[in-house]
Amino acid sequence: MVGLLVVSHSAKAAAGIVEIAAEMASDVSLVAAGGDPDGGIGTDADAIAEGLAEADDGEGVVVLVDLGSATMNAELAVEMADAEAMLADAPVLEGAVNAAVHAAGSKATLDSTLDAAEEARGMSKL
Amino acid sequence: MSGHGDTEALLDALARIDERIHEERAYLTELDSRIGDADHGNNLARGVGAVTDKRDELAGMALDEAVKTVGTTLISEVGGAAGPLYGGSVMAASRELEGGLDAESALAFARAYREKLMERGDARPGDKTMVDAVVPAVHTFQRAIEEDDLPPVDALAKAVDAARRGVEYTVPLRASKGRASYLGLRAVGHRDPGATSTLFVLEELLATAEDRAGAASVRDARADDAVEHGADAERAAGEEDE
């Protein structure tokens, strides 16, 4: 099954988003990588790389990111990692929920899960 | 030998950079508190401190390997956007130093650094980022080496001047990348912290190069002296023989 990794500047936000998405898709491998190396606000390429390895069961990982440096550190981690992984250009929470629901389906692939995450970009709330 | 002497020069530069970043830590954080998330000084200080902790390990490495290790250490320890930008660019450019350090490899390193930095940050000149210091510096360094045929130390001095002008150029700009881009007009009137720390690093590289060039010319002068004195002594000995 395709795995999902949520990268946020806040460890709490990343864990919280995983918690919300897991409620919709409890079988999907959902991993959080939030906070800087000291546990403060920020992102950490090494922690993201570890998260990728943890989320991957061989079918690849879709990565959801929040602000600027999350994208950069996630790109670096993807370059360093063994797992096949793709960054979603999507809002982190809505993208994670969409992707998790999709990944739980039997026909989901890495590409289709990425598409599902990115479809969240166009979701309107009102 | 890809230059134990080159690694020694790197260690000199790293020690200076560590000292400078710690001196400027509060200033960099203050700049970042105006337009960012107030962590640039502390993050960088933590990163260069971690590099200094690896000094003994680095001393046993060839230059390119040592520079690569500096990059991976910065990626692991700096965090924020500066970690992947500084660390990732240093790591990617380190392979240009495989044959040691000379004008050609220094230029290749500088160009590779610029390329990776702009790619990773998706930033161009005028976006109010590190790129505003790096692009004019590398451009000037290249011209000084390739067209003006200046010695590397003089070329670096010109590059540092160009970076300094680049940093000042960030003051009136709005930011279009990074956290500062959320601030719109509120970012105007402030120096970019990443461009500023880049300038500090370049200034310390220049100081190291000038120091070592100075020491080398003193050594050369001493060697010349020794040769001349030796020749005098031989001549004197010869005259005595006659």
Image (tube, rainbow, N blue to C red):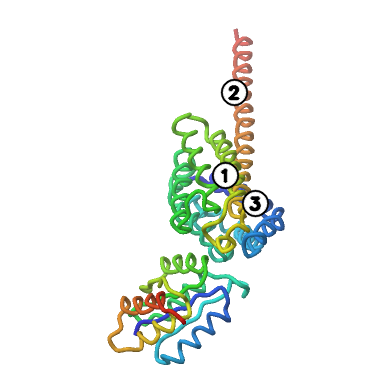
Residue A27 appears in the picture as rendered: yes
> Could you tell me the amino acid type at mark 1?
Gly
- Could you tell me how far apart the alpha carbons at marks 1 and 3 are, in whole angstroms? 14 Å
- The residue lying toward the viewer, choosing from B56 and B42, is B42
**Outermost residue toward the top?**
B242
Q: Are marks 1 and 3 on the same chain?
A: yes
- Residue under label 3: B189
Q: Nearer the viewer, mark 2 or mark 1?
A: 1
Q: Picture coordinates of residue B54 (x, y %)? A: 60, 60
User: B189 and A125: which one is in front?
Assistant: A125
Tell me the element at label 2: helix
Q: Which of the 4 image quadrants contains residue A13?
A: bottom right
Residue under label 1: B166
| Residue pictured at 52% horizontal, 47% vertical | B134
Q: Residue furthest front?
A: A126
Q: Position of residue B179 (x, y in %)?
A: 57, 63
Give the answer, above or below, for where B33 lies relative to A86: above
Secondary-structure class at tag 1 = helix
Q: Are marks 3 and 2 on the same chain?
A: yes
User: Could you tell whether A90 is left or right of B67 in the image?
Assistant: left
Binning the other alpha carbons within 10 Å of mark 1 as few (below 14), some (14 to 19) or many (20 upward) gives: many
| Alpha carbons under labels 2 and 1: distance apart | 46 Å
Question: In the image, what residue occupies the spot 61% across and 61% down?
Answer: B47
Q: Which quadrant is home to the C terminus of chain B?
A: top right
Name the residue type under label 3.
Answer: Gly
| Amino acid at circle 2 | Val
* Quadrant assignment, res B21: bottom right
